[in-house]
Image: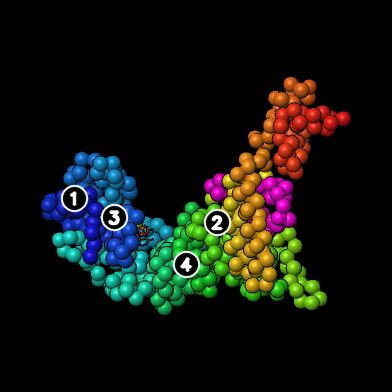
Amino acid sequence: HISMPEKVKEIIGTLRAAGFEAWAVGGCVRDSLLGREPEDWDITTSATPEQTKELFSRTFDTGIQHGTVTVLLDGEGFEVTTYRIDGAYEDSRHPKEVTFTRNLKDDLLRRDFTINAMAYSDEEGLVDIFGGMEDLERGVIRCVGNARERFSEDALRILRGVRFAAQLGFRLEEETREGMEALAPTLQKISAERIQTELLKILLSGRPDMLRTAWELGITAWFLPEFDRIMDTSQETPHHMYTVGEHTLHALLNVRPDRVLRLAMLFHDMGKPDLKTVDEEGVAHFKKHALRSEEIARDVMRRLKFDNETQRKVAVLVRYHDYRMPVQGKYVRRAMNRIGLDLFPLYLEVRRADVLAQSTYLREEKLADIDGVEALYRQSLARQECVTLKDLAVNGRDLIEAGFRPGKELGVVLESLLEAVIEDPQLNEKSRLLELAEEKKK
Ligand code: ATP
Ligand code: MG
Protein backbone atom coordinates (compact mmCIF):
# COMPACT_ATOMS: atom_id res chain seq x y z
CA HIS A 1 0.00 0.00 0.00
CA ILE A 2 1.25 3.44 -0.93
CA SER A 3 0.15 6.62 0.77
CA MET A 4 0.92 9.70 -1.26
CA PRO A 5 1.28 13.19 0.18
CA GLU A 6 -1.78 15.41 -0.41
CA LYS A 7 0.06 17.66 -2.84
CA VAL A 8 1.10 14.73 -5.02
CA LYS A 9 -2.53 13.57 -5.10
CA GLU A 10 -3.55 17.06 -6.06
CA ILE A 11 -1.09 17.24 -8.99
CA ILE A 12 -2.04 13.80 -10.27
CA GLY A 13 -5.74 14.62 -9.80
CA THR A 14 -5.45 17.87 -11.75
CA LEU A 15 -3.66 16.18 -14.66
CA ARG A 16 -6.16 13.31 -14.76
CA ALA A 17 -9.16 15.67 -14.59
CA ALA A 18 -7.77 17.35 -17.71
CA GLY A 19 -7.77 13.99 -19.50
CA PHE A 20 -4.08 13.06 -19.10
CA GLU A 21 -2.51 10.07 -17.44
CA ALA A 22 -0.37 10.80 -14.37
CA TRP A 23 1.51 8.64 -11.88
CA ALA A 24 4.01 8.72 -9.07
CA VAL A 25 7.06 6.94 -10.44
CA GLY A 26 10.54 5.66 -9.67
CA GLY A 27 12.30 6.07 -6.32
CA CYS A 28 9.22 7.23 -4.41
CA VAL A 29 7.24 4.12 -5.39
CA ARG A 30 10.20 1.88 -4.55
CA ASP A 31 10.77 3.49 -1.15
CA SER A 32 7.05 3.50 -0.25
CA LEU A 33 6.76 -0.20 -1.04
CA LEU A 34 9.76 -0.81 1.22
CA GLY A 35 8.16 1.20 4.00
CA ARG A 36 10.87 3.85 3.72
CA GLU A 37 10.23 7.57 3.60
CA PRO A 38 10.78 8.74 -0.03
CA GLU A 39 13.19 11.67 -0.46
CA ASP A 40 11.06 13.26 -3.16
CA TRP A 41 8.01 12.41 -5.25
CA ASP A 42 8.45 12.38 -9.02
CA ILE A 43 5.44 12.39 -11.32
CA THR A 44 5.27 11.06 -14.86
CA THR A 45 2.50 12.10 -17.23
CA SER A 46 1.20 11.83 -20.78
CA ALA A 47 0.78 15.64 -20.83
CA THR A 48 3.46 17.61 -22.68
CA PRO A 49 5.44 20.19 -20.69
CA GLU A 50 3.33 22.96 -22.28
CA GLN A 51 0.11 21.23 -21.28
CA THR A 52 1.36 20.73 -17.72
CA LYS A 53 2.31 24.40 -17.46
CA GLU A 54 -1.19 25.48 -18.51
CA LEU A 55 -2.76 23.49 -15.68
CA PHE A 56 -0.78 24.94 -12.78
CA SER A 57 -0.39 28.56 -11.80
CA ARG A 58 3.18 28.31 -10.58
CA THR A 59 5.72 26.26 -12.53
CA PHE A 60 9.24 26.62 -13.74
CA ASP A 61 11.25 24.94 -16.45
CA THR A 62 13.68 22.55 -14.84
CA GLY A 63 14.82 20.52 -17.80
CA ILE A 64 12.31 21.41 -20.42
CA GLN A 65 14.32 19.76 -23.22
CA HIS A 66 14.05 16.50 -21.23
CA GLY A 67 10.37 17.11 -20.55
CA THR A 68 10.64 18.14 -16.91
CA VAL A 69 8.60 20.95 -15.37
CA THR A 70 8.63 21.76 -11.66
CA VAL A 71 5.19 22.44 -10.24
CA LEU A 72 5.17 24.62 -7.13
CA LEU A 73 2.48 24.13 -4.50
CA ASP A 74 2.81 26.36 -1.42
CA GLY A 75 6.48 26.75 -2.16
CA GLU A 76 7.10 23.03 -2.41
CA GLY A 77 8.36 21.82 -5.80
CA PHE A 78 7.44 18.57 -7.58
CA GLU A 79 9.04 17.40 -10.79
CA VAL A 80 6.51 16.47 -13.45
CA THR A 81 8.07 14.77 -16.46
CA THR A 82 6.42 13.88 -19.75
CA TYR A 83 6.51 10.20 -20.76
CA ARG A 84 9.62 9.90 -22.86
CA ILE A 85 11.87 7.56 -24.76
CA ASP A 86 15.57 8.34 -24.47
CA GLY A 87 17.36 8.55 -27.79
CA ALA A 88 20.83 7.22 -28.48
CA TYR A 89 23.36 8.11 -25.79
CA GLU A 90 26.36 10.07 -26.95
CA ASP A 91 28.84 9.59 -24.18
CA SER A 92 27.58 6.90 -21.81
CA ARG A 93 25.82 9.68 -20.01
CA HIS A 94 23.56 12.03 -21.99
CA PRO A 95 20.82 10.96 -24.36
CA LYS A 96 21.35 12.86 -27.62
CA GLU A 97 17.65 13.52 -27.92
CA VAL A 98 14.51 12.50 -26.11
CA THR A 99 11.19 11.74 -27.74
CA PHE A 100 7.92 12.21 -25.94
CA THR A 101 5.54 9.28 -26.03
CA ARG A 102 1.90 8.66 -25.14
CA ASN A 103 2.73 5.34 -23.61
CA LEU A 104 3.60 4.73 -19.94
CA LYS A 105 5.31 1.46 -20.79
CA ASP A 106 7.85 3.22 -23.02
CA ASP A 107 8.65 5.60 -20.19
CA LEU A 108 9.20 2.75 -17.73
CA LEU A 109 11.42 0.95 -20.25
CA ARG A 110 14.01 3.75 -20.22
CA ARG A 111 14.51 3.46 -16.45
CA ASP A 112 17.56 1.77 -14.97
CA PHE A 113 16.45 -0.97 -12.57
CA THR A 114 13.23 -2.95 -12.19
CA ILE A 115 12.71 -1.64 -8.65
CA ASN A 116 12.92 1.93 -10.07
CA ALA A 117 10.55 1.26 -12.97
CA MET A 118 7.19 1.04 -11.23
CA ALA A 119 4.39 3.62 -11.36
CA TYR A 120 1.49 4.16 -9.01
CA SER A 121 -1.73 6.14 -8.79
CA ASP A 122 -4.57 5.84 -6.28
CA GLU A 123 -7.02 5.43 -9.13
CA GLU A 124 -5.27 2.61 -10.98
CA GLY A 125 -2.91 1.14 -8.45
CA LEU A 126 0.57 -0.23 -9.18
CA VAL A 127 1.99 -0.65 -12.67
CA ASP A 128 4.81 -3.17 -12.53
CA ILE A 129 5.74 -4.49 -15.95
CA PHE A 130 9.25 -5.82 -15.28
CA GLY A 131 8.83 -7.67 -11.99
CA GLY A 132 10.00 -4.83 -9.77
CA MET A 133 7.84 -5.96 -6.87
CA GLU A 134 9.28 -9.46 -6.97
CA ASP A 135 12.81 -8.06 -7.06
CA LEU A 136 12.00 -5.83 -4.10
CA GLU A 137 10.78 -8.85 -2.18
CA ARG A 138 13.80 -10.93 -3.11
CA GLY A 139 16.24 -8.10 -2.56
CA VAL A 140 17.64 -7.98 -6.08
CA ILE A 141 19.03 -5.17 -8.24
CA ARG A 142 18.23 -6.06 -11.85
CA CYS A 143 18.41 -3.99 -15.00
CA VAL A 144 15.32 -3.30 -17.06
CA GLY A 145 16.09 -5.25 -20.23
CA ASN A 146 19.58 -6.17 -21.39
CA ALA A 147 22.14 -5.22 -18.76
CA ARG A 148 25.07 -4.56 -21.10
CA GLU A 149 22.95 -2.36 -23.32
CA ARG A 150 21.63 -0.39 -20.40
CA PHE A 151 25.09 0.20 -18.95
CA SER A 152 26.51 1.15 -22.34
CA GLU A 153 23.78 3.76 -22.72
CA ASP A 154 24.74 5.31 -19.40
CA ALA A 155 27.74 4.29 -17.31
CA LEU A 156 26.46 6.14 -14.26
CA ARG A 157 23.96 3.30 -13.87
CA ILE A 158 26.85 1.02 -12.83
CA LEU A 159 27.52 3.15 -9.77
CA ARG A 160 23.82 3.69 -9.12
CA GLY A 161 23.38 -0.08 -9.06
CA VAL A 162 26.14 -0.55 -6.51
CA ARG A 163 24.70 2.33 -4.52
CA PHE A 164 21.16 0.93 -4.42
CA ALA A 165 22.54 -2.45 -3.38
CA ALA A 166 24.43 -0.72 -0.55
CA GLN A 167 21.49 1.43 0.55
CA LEU A 168 18.90 -1.33 0.43
CA GLY A 169 21.13 -4.26 1.40
CA PHE A 170 20.28 -5.97 -1.92
CA ARG A 171 22.37 -8.26 -4.09
CA LEU A 172 23.20 -7.80 -7.75
CA GLU A 173 21.42 -10.15 -10.12
CA GLU A 174 23.84 -12.21 -12.21
CA GLU A 175 23.39 -10.56 -15.63
CA THR A 176 23.39 -7.13 -14.06
CA ARG A 177 26.64 -8.02 -12.33
CA GLU A 178 28.21 -9.23 -15.56
CA GLY A 179 27.07 -6.09 -17.35
CA MET A 180 28.70 -3.93 -14.69
CA GLU A 181 31.94 -5.86 -14.98
CA ALA A 182 31.97 -5.63 -18.77
CA LEU A 183 31.22 -1.91 -18.95
CA ALA A 184 33.24 -0.76 -15.92
CA PRO A 185 35.91 0.99 -18.06
CA THR A 186 33.26 3.38 -19.42
CA LEU A 187 33.05 4.91 -15.92
CA GLN A 188 35.98 7.06 -17.07
CA LYS A 189 33.47 9.21 -18.91
CA ILE A 190 31.46 10.04 -15.80
CA SER A 191 32.02 13.44 -14.24
CA ALA A 192 33.77 13.86 -10.89
CA GLU A 193 30.67 15.44 -9.36
CA ARG A 194 28.47 12.46 -10.14
CA ILE A 195 31.07 10.02 -8.91
CA GLN A 196 31.39 11.99 -5.69
CA THR A 197 27.62 11.86 -5.16
CA GLU A 198 27.39 8.10 -5.67
CA LEU A 199 30.53 7.34 -3.66
CA LEU A 200 29.16 9.34 -0.72
CA LYS A 201 25.84 7.53 -0.92
CA ILE A 202 27.66 4.20 -0.82
CA LEU A 203 29.84 5.31 2.11
CA LEU A 204 26.87 6.65 4.08
CA SER A 205 24.70 3.59 3.45
CA GLY A 206 24.21 0.63 5.76
CA ARG A 207 26.59 -1.39 3.58
CA PRO A 208 29.66 0.71 2.75
CA ASP A 209 31.43 -2.63 2.34
CA MET A 210 29.63 -2.96 -1.03
CA LEU A 211 32.88 -1.36 -2.15
CA ARG A 212 34.30 -4.87 -1.91
CA THR A 213 31.83 -6.10 -4.52
CA ALA A 214 32.59 -3.04 -6.65
CA TRP A 215 36.28 -3.91 -6.40
CA GLU A 216 35.68 -7.58 -7.29
CA LEU A 217 33.82 -6.47 -10.38
CA GLY A 218 36.65 -4.16 -11.44
CA ILE A 219 34.52 -1.05 -10.90
CA THR A 220 36.57 0.82 -8.30
CA ALA A 221 39.63 0.58 -10.56
CA TRP A 222 38.06 3.23 -12.81
CA PHE A 223 37.24 5.87 -10.26
CA LEU A 224 39.16 4.96 -7.10
CA PRO A 225 42.26 2.93 -8.08
CA GLU A 226 43.76 3.81 -4.68
CA PHE A 227 41.20 1.44 -3.20
CA ASP A 228 42.36 -1.44 -5.40
CA ARG A 229 45.89 -0.91 -4.13
CA ILE A 230 44.91 -1.37 -0.47
CA MET A 231 42.80 -4.40 -1.35
CA ASP A 232 45.99 -5.94 -2.72
CA THR A 233 48.23 -5.04 0.24
CA SER A 234 48.70 -7.62 2.98
CA GLN A 235 50.02 -6.64 6.39
CA GLU A 236 51.68 -9.42 8.33
CA THR A 237 51.81 -7.82 11.75
CA PRO A 238 50.38 -9.09 15.03
CA HIS A 239 48.13 -6.01 15.06
CA HIS A 240 46.22 -7.05 11.97
CA MET A 241 44.39 -10.04 10.62
CA TYR A 242 43.33 -8.58 7.27
CA THR A 243 44.71 -6.95 4.17
CA VAL A 244 44.79 -3.17 4.42
CA GLY A 245 41.65 -3.06 2.27
CA GLU A 246 39.67 -5.53 4.40
CA HIS A 247 40.74 -3.66 7.51
CA THR A 248 39.49 -0.44 5.90
CA LEU A 249 36.10 -1.99 5.09
CA HIS A 250 35.70 -3.12 8.69
CA ALA A 251 36.79 0.27 10.01
CA LEU A 252 34.16 1.92 7.77
CA LEU A 253 31.45 -0.17 9.35
CA ASN A 254 32.70 0.80 12.80
CA VAL A 255 31.94 4.51 12.46
CA ARG A 256 28.58 6.28 12.34
CA PRO A 257 27.27 7.24 8.88
CA ASP A 258 28.77 10.72 8.98
CA ARG A 259 30.42 11.94 5.78
CA VAL A 260 33.64 13.20 7.37
CA LEU A 261 34.05 10.07 9.52
CA ARG A 262 33.32 7.65 6.68
CA LEU A 263 35.68 9.46 4.31
CA ALA A 264 38.40 9.52 6.97
CA MET A 265 38.07 5.77 7.46
CA LEU A 266 38.12 5.15 3.70
CA PHE A 267 41.42 7.01 3.35
CA HIS A 268 43.12 6.40 6.68
CA ASP A 269 45.50 3.67 5.51
CA MET A 270 45.76 4.44 1.79
CA GLY A 271 49.42 5.37 2.15
CA LYS A 272 50.43 1.94 3.42
CA PRO A 273 51.08 0.29 0.04
CA ASP A 274 53.66 2.99 -0.78
CA LEU A 275 55.56 2.53 2.46
CA LYS A 276 55.44 -1.17 3.02
CA THR A 277 58.67 -2.85 4.09
CA VAL A 278 59.09 -6.35 5.48
CA ASP A 279 61.83 -7.18 8.02
CA GLU A 280 63.82 -10.43 8.43
CA GLU A 281 61.08 -11.94 10.56
CA GLY A 282 58.56 -11.24 7.84
CA VAL A 283 56.82 -8.54 9.86
CA ALA A 284 55.42 -5.68 7.78
CA HIS A 285 56.23 -2.08 8.71
CA PHE A 286 54.48 1.04 7.47
CA LYS A 287 56.46 4.05 8.62
CA LYS A 288 54.74 7.45 8.61
CA HIS A 289 51.88 6.01 6.63
CA ALA A 290 49.44 8.52 8.09
CA LEU A 291 51.17 11.41 6.33
CA ARG A 292 51.25 9.53 3.04
CA SER A 293 47.59 8.61 3.53
CA GLU A 294 46.77 12.25 4.06
CA GLU A 295 48.43 13.16 0.74
CA ILE A 296 46.45 10.51 -1.07
CA ALA A 297 43.22 11.58 0.63
CA ARG A 298 43.81 15.16 -0.51
CA ASP A 299 44.55 14.04 -4.08
CA VAL A 300 41.44 11.90 -4.31
CA MET A 301 39.18 14.51 -2.73
CA ARG A 302 40.52 17.20 -5.06
CA ARG A 303 40.03 14.92 -8.06
CA LEU A 304 36.45 14.18 -7.00
CA LYS A 305 35.82 17.87 -6.32
CA PHE A 306 34.97 17.71 -2.64
CA ASP A 307 34.41 21.07 -0.96
CA ASN A 308 37.32 22.64 0.92
CA GLU A 309 35.85 22.21 4.39
CA THR A 310 35.34 18.47 3.90
CA GLN A 311 38.85 18.16 2.48
CA ARG A 312 40.34 19.94 5.48
CA LYS A 313 38.49 17.94 8.12
CA VAL A 314 39.13 14.57 6.50
CA ALA A 315 42.80 15.40 5.93
CA VAL A 316 43.30 16.29 9.62
CA LEU A 317 41.60 13.10 10.80
CA VAL A 318 43.66 10.96 8.43
CA ARG A 319 46.89 12.69 9.50
CA TYR A 320 46.17 12.11 13.19
CA HIS A 321 44.31 8.80 13.04
CA ASP A 322 47.26 6.98 14.52
CA TYR A 323 48.46 9.79 16.80
CA ARG A 324 48.97 8.39 20.27
CA MET A 325 50.17 10.13 23.40
CA PRO A 326 50.85 9.35 27.04
CA VAL A 327 47.59 9.52 28.97
CA GLN A 328 48.45 12.72 30.78
CA GLY A 329 46.76 16.09 30.78
CA LYS A 330 49.43 18.08 28.99
CA TYR A 331 49.79 15.61 26.15
CA VAL A 332 46.05 15.45 25.67
CA ARG A 333 45.82 19.26 25.70
CA ARG A 334 48.57 19.43 23.10
CA ALA A 335 46.66 16.99 20.91
CA MET A 336 43.50 19.08 21.36
CA ASN A 337 45.50 22.06 20.10
CA ARG A 338 46.96 20.21 17.10
CA ILE A 339 43.83 18.39 16.01
CA GLY A 340 41.45 21.24 16.84
CA LEU A 341 38.53 21.25 19.21
CA ASP A 342 36.00 20.75 16.41
CA LEU A 343 37.68 17.53 15.29
CA PHE A 344 38.94 16.08 18.56
CA PRO A 345 35.78 14.09 19.36
CA LEU A 346 35.84 12.69 15.80
CA TYR A 347 39.49 11.78 16.25
CA LEU A 348 38.48 9.64 19.26
CA GLU A 349 35.83 7.93 17.14
CA VAL A 350 38.33 7.27 14.38
CA ARG A 351 40.83 5.75 16.79
CA ARG A 352 38.24 3.43 18.32
CA ALA A 353 36.94 2.32 14.92
CA ASP A 354 40.49 1.65 13.80
CA VAL A 355 41.36 -0.45 16.85
CA LEU A 356 38.13 -2.46 16.59
CA ALA A 357 38.97 -3.33 12.98
CA GLN A 358 42.39 -4.67 13.99
CA SER A 359 43.18 -8.07 15.47
CA THR A 360 42.40 -8.58 19.15
CA TYR A 361 46.13 -8.30 19.95
CA LEU A 362 46.44 -5.70 22.76
CA ARG A 363 42.88 -4.54 21.98
CA GLU A 364 41.83 -4.04 25.61
CA GLU A 365 44.95 -1.98 26.31
CA LYS A 366 44.43 0.16 23.23
CA LEU A 367 40.78 0.84 24.08
CA ALA A 368 41.62 1.62 27.71
CA ASP A 369 44.16 4.11 26.41
CA ILE A 370 41.57 5.86 24.28
CA ASP A 371 39.13 5.92 27.21
CA GLY A 372 41.84 7.56 29.30
CA VAL A 373 42.46 10.21 26.65
CA GLU A 374 38.75 10.87 26.37
CA ALA A 375 38.38 11.29 30.14
CA LEU A 376 41.21 13.84 30.20
CA TYR A 377 39.76 15.64 27.20
CA ARG A 378 36.38 15.94 28.95
CA GLN A 379 38.04 17.09 32.14
CA SER A 380 39.97 19.74 30.27
CA LEU A 381 36.78 20.99 28.60
CA ALA A 382 34.97 21.06 31.95
CA ARG A 383 37.77 23.09 33.47
CA GLN A 384 37.72 25.39 30.43
CA GLU A 385 41.45 25.06 30.06
CA CYS A 386 43.13 27.06 27.35
CA VAL A 387 44.37 25.00 24.41
CA THR A 388 44.11 27.59 21.62
CA LEU A 389 45.48 31.08 21.03
CA LYS A 390 42.05 32.61 21.25
CA ASP A 391 41.69 31.45 24.89
CA LEU A 392 45.11 32.70 25.92
CA ALA A 393 44.91 35.42 28.63
CA VAL A 394 47.06 37.76 26.51
CA ASN A 395 46.82 38.71 22.85
CA GLY A 396 49.03 40.57 20.39
CA ARG A 397 47.76 43.97 21.48
CA ASP A 398 48.63 43.25 25.13
CA LEU A 399 52.16 42.39 24.07
CA ILE A 400 52.52 45.58 22.01
CA GLU A 401 51.31 47.63 24.95
CA ALA A 402 53.94 45.88 27.05
CA GLY A 403 56.59 47.11 24.63
CA PHE A 404 56.91 44.32 22.11
CA ARG A 405 57.46 45.29 18.51
CA PRO A 406 54.62 44.48 16.11
CA GLY A 407 55.47 41.89 13.50
CA LYS A 408 56.09 38.27 12.92
CA GLU A 409 57.94 37.73 16.18
CA LEU A 410 54.79 38.51 18.10
CA GLY A 411 53.24 35.32 16.75
CA VAL A 412 56.24 33.31 17.84
CA VAL A 413 56.02 34.75 21.37
CA LEU A 414 52.28 34.01 21.57
CA GLU A 415 52.83 30.44 20.41
CA SER A 416 55.49 29.90 23.06
CA LEU A 417 53.16 31.30 25.74
CA LEU A 418 50.43 28.94 24.57
CA GLU A 419 52.89 26.05 24.72
CA ALA A 420 53.67 27.02 28.34
CA VAL A 421 49.97 27.22 29.22
CA ILE A 422 49.32 23.83 27.65
CA GLU A 423 52.07 22.45 29.90
CA ASP A 424 50.65 24.24 32.94
CA PRO A 425 47.11 25.65 32.76
CA GLN A 426 47.74 27.68 35.96
CA LEU A 427 49.91 30.05 33.94
CA ASN A 428 46.98 31.40 31.96
CA GLU A 429 46.81 34.78 33.73
CA LYS A 430 47.65 38.05 32.10
CA SER A 431 50.33 39.22 34.54
CA ARG A 432 52.09 35.87 34.67
CA LEU A 433 52.10 35.56 30.89
CA LEU A 434 53.50 39.08 30.46
CA GLU A 435 56.28 38.23 32.92
CA LEU A 436 56.98 35.08 31.00
CA ALA A 437 57.05 37.05 27.75
CA GLU A 438 59.59 39.46 29.24
CA GLU A 439 61.82 36.53 30.18
CA LYS A 440 61.58 35.21 26.64
CA LYS A 441 62.62 38.59 25.27
CA LYS A 442 66.00 38.25 26.96
P1 ATP B 1 17.23 8.56 -4.87
O1 ATP B 1 16.35 9.75 -5.06
O2 ATP B 1 17.12 7.85 -3.59
O3 ATP B 1 18.64 8.82 -5.29
P2 ATP B 1 15.83 7.58 -7.17
O4 ATP B 1 15.56 6.21 -7.68
O5 ATP B 1 14.66 8.45 -6.87
O6 ATP B 1 16.75 7.43 -5.92
P3 ATP B 1 16.65 9.67 -8.94
O7 ATP B 1 18.03 9.99 -9.41
O8 ATP B 1 15.91 10.62 -8.09
O9 ATP B 1 16.77 8.26 -8.21
O10 ATP B 1 15.82 9.33 -10.25
C1 ATP B 1 14.42 9.09 -10.26
C2 ATP B 1 14.08 7.96 -11.21
O11 ATP B 1 14.55 8.25 -12.53
C3 ATP B 1 14.75 6.63 -10.85
O12 ATP B 1 14.00 5.90 -9.92
C4 ATP B 1 14.79 5.93 -12.21
O13 ATP B 1 13.53 5.40 -12.54
C5 ATP B 1 15.08 7.09 -13.15
N1 ATP B 1 16.51 7.30 -13.38
C6 ATP B 1 17.32 8.16 -12.71
N2 ATP B 1 18.57 8.13 -13.18
C7 ATP B 1 18.56 7.23 -14.18
C8 ATP B 1 19.55 6.75 -15.09
N3 ATP B 1 20.81 7.20 -15.02
N4 ATP B 1 19.17 5.83 -16.00
C9 ATP B 1 17.89 5.39 -16.06
N5 ATP B 1 16.93 5.79 -15.24
C10 ATP B 1 17.24 6.70 -14.31
MG1 MG C 1 14.70 10.52 -6.26
> What residue sits right under mark 2 in the picture?
261
- Quick one: 38 or 440, which is closer to the camera? 440
> What residue sits right under mark 1 in the picture?
10
| Residue 313 versus residue 289 in the image, above or below | above
- 3 or 1: tag closer to the N-terminus: 1
Q: Amino acid at mark 2?
A: Leu
Structural distance between the alpha carbons of marks 3 and 4: 26 Å
Q: Which quadrant holds residue 341?
A: top right
- 3 or 2: tag closer to the N-terminus: 3
Q: Is residue 86 left or right of residue 179?
A: left
Classify mark 4: helix, strand or loop: loop
Please identify, in this view, whether the residue under mark 3 or under mark 1 is nearer the observer.
1
**Quadrant (top left/top right/bottom left/bottom right) for the C terminus:** top right
- 3 or 4: tag closer to the N-terminus: 3
- Quick one: 234 or 436, which is closer to the camera? 436
State the residue at coordinates (42%, 59%). Answer: 93
State the residue at coordinates (73%, 59%). Answer: 288
Classify mark 3: helix, strand or loop: strand
Residue 393 colored in magenta in the image: no
